[in-house]
Every structure is written in structure tokens, then in C-alpha cells.
Image (cartoon, rainbow, N blue to C red):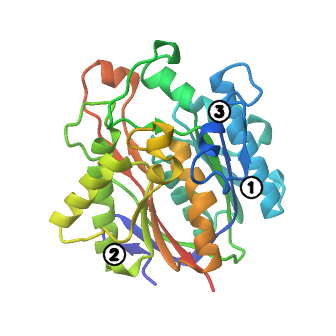
Amino acid sequence: MEQMLGTQSLRYAEACYILASASVVGKKEGEGPLGNCFDMICEDDKFGQENWEKAESQLQKEALTLALGKAGVKKEDLRYLFAGDLLGQNMATSFGLLDFQVPLFGLYGACSTAGESLSLASMCVAGGFAELVGAVTSSHFASAEKQFRYPLEYANQRPLSATWTVTGGGAYILGKKKSPVRIAGITTGRIVDYGIKDSMNMGAAMAPAAADLIEAHLKDFSADPAEYDAIITGDLGSVGREILLDLLRERGYDLAKVHRDCGMEIFDSETQNTCAGGSGCGCSATVLSAYFLPKLISGEWRRALFVPTGALLSATSFHEGENVPGIAHGVLLEHAD
């Protein structure tokens, strides 16, 4: 089988399997529509720690510990970890995973990091370079607000286009042993810049990258949207979703019936005041694990494309007046009979 497809995709000759996953979230996420789906909900958003950054590190530690337990493996069984977060120098990852002492690839793809980590982890297994690996991603509302927007004490008002960073961490154990869900291939995204500068409208910044990735995937795999039970974006929210559907409609693809967005699933925007929806690395990582993956495990869904989306801005680039480019990564998930 030819493993390299088109210009951006891989189809694995030997599939990589998701052996287990775990999701850990904060109080607000637990109060949302998916509250009954998460593995752990912590009433204390500091997770017993003294500051927000340490709280996010604890998120990763708890998520990976739970995933290892569900997979029935020990940390010593992992060959590599692929992990990242939103904070400067990936500090939540560095301190959160320090005690595991597993060789680490630290990753940054903004809110697309869940897709990036699953892509690279699955490549490692499918390529024969490891029997077992872990993929971990997290975000925290307070630590992200502190770094990218305003301190919480400032109490700034949010426009309706804004999204709410999810306090959550997701962890996945991947391996060669057959399980109900396999990663059959990936499509790696390009940086796409449509000139968006508004840090309170991340959906608009990321939607063009999601459209570019989905179009590339469908072309590379010679596929039609109707062949998928769902095409799942990470955190476009209600604003980004409409832009995505419009962009793909112009290119000849109608995703209206199969598109789902993790950011629109995790909160009830009307009752929880989250404006356009949820966002952050932890948004797609937790919603995939808690809500969408069970549909593939049970066989209710046979095929889904997971497309976490990221806005590539930093505090420095924003204050220097740079645009906010976007990126997205695609992971092809299939039910394994």
C-alpha cells in the first residue's frame, strides 16, 4: 500500500490503535452538556495547587495517570510521550509530566496540539518505532487568560465572537495491539493567514486553516464528506463554523450534515455565558475522549475525521500588530471490527 497520499497525507499500511483515553476537566466544564461523560471533574479549578500554572500541570498528570490505568499499562511501558499546552515554553507539560520520566517530545500547535500529538504519536507506532506511546494535551482558562488576554481581576467584557478556554486535559495511549478504534491515517496542516488580527475572534482566524486541511484530506484520500459519520473541528465555535461551511461550500464541499465542533459541544453558550463556545488545547482533547470516541468504540460511528484547530498568536506577536495565522491537523479515526 502506498502510504504517502497527495501532498499532505499519510495512510498507514499498519494501523495504530487507541488503547485507552482519559479526560479531566474543571467545574464549569462539568456543569455543561457533557458533564456525565468526563472521567474526572474537579470542583477546585486550582486542582489543589497554589497557582494556575501548577493547576494545569496537575491536569496533565491526572489525565495521563487515568489513561495508563484504563489501558492496563505502566508508565515504564511507554516508549515516548508527545505532549503540549498553551503556556510559554510548554511549562504545564514540562512540570506536569516530569515525574513520569518517559522520553518526551514537547509540542506546540496552539489549540491544534491534540491533533499534532496524535499525528506524531501514531506515526511513531505505525512506523514501527514504538510499541506503546502517550499523547497528552491540556489548557486552563485562568492560565490562558493571564498569558494571552487580561488578568481575571480586570473583568474585561467579551464580544459574542469570543470563546471560553476549556480547563481540561486529555491523554491517549496508542499502540499496535488491536482495539475498537484505529488511527488509519493523518493529514498535516499548513499555516494559513487570512489577515485576522482580532484575538477575541479566534474562530475567524482558524476557520480558513480548517477548510484548507479538510479540502486537502478529502482530495488526498479521494473521499467525499458523505463517507464520514462526522468531521470534527476543535474549537471554531459558532462564528468559525459558519465561516468554515461557507469556505468549503465555495470549494464544492457541503459539510453541513457531518460537521461537529468540540467547542460547541462542551458548553451551553446560552446558560453558561461562553459566547461562541469553548476553545483551548484541552477542548478538543477532552471532548474527543469523553464524547466522540465512545461512538467509534461502540460502532455507532464507523469513520470520523478529527481536525483540531489552532490560532498561532503569542502575547508578543499580538502587541507587535502581527496577524493571527491558523493551523489544523487531521486524524482519521475508524471503528475496527
Mark 3, other Cα within 10 Å: few <14 / some 14–19 / many ≥20: many
- What's the distance in space between the residues labelled 2 and 1, CA to CA? 31 Å
Q: Residue 330, how many percent across, how many down?
A: 43, 61
Q: Residue 68, how many percent across, how many down?
A: 78, 55
Q: Earlier in the sequence, mark 2 or mark 1?
A: 1
Name the residue: 27% across, 54% down. Answer: 242
Mark 2 or mark 1, which is nearer to you? Answer: 2
- What's the distance in space between the residues labelled 3 and 1, CA to CA? 17 Å
Q: In this view, does 38 lie to the left or right of 251?
A: right
**Residue 21 image-quadrant placement:** bottom right
Q: Earlier in the sequence, mark 3 or mark 1?
A: 3
Q: Is residue 2 left or right of residue 334?
A: left
Name the residue: 72% across, 30% down. Answer: 44
Residue linked to disc 1: 67
Secondary element at image label 1: helix
Q: Residue 285, how many percent across, how many down?
A: 57, 51
> Cβ–Cβ below 8 Å for labels 3 and 2?
no
Q: Give the vertical position of 116 relative to 14 (above or below).
A: above
| Residue 30 showing in the rendered view | yes
Name the residue: 74% across, 55% down. Answer: 67
Residue linked to disc 2: 225
Where the C terminus falls, by quadrant? Answer: bottom right
Secondary element at image label 2: helix
- Most foreground residue, 129 or 119: 119
Name the residue: 64% across, 63% down. Answer: 129
Mark 1, other Cα within 10 Å: few <14 / some 14–19 / many ≥20: many
Q: What residue type is labelled 1?
A: Ala
Indicate which disc residue 56 carries. 3
Q: Which of marks 3 and 2 is nearer the N terminus?
A: 3
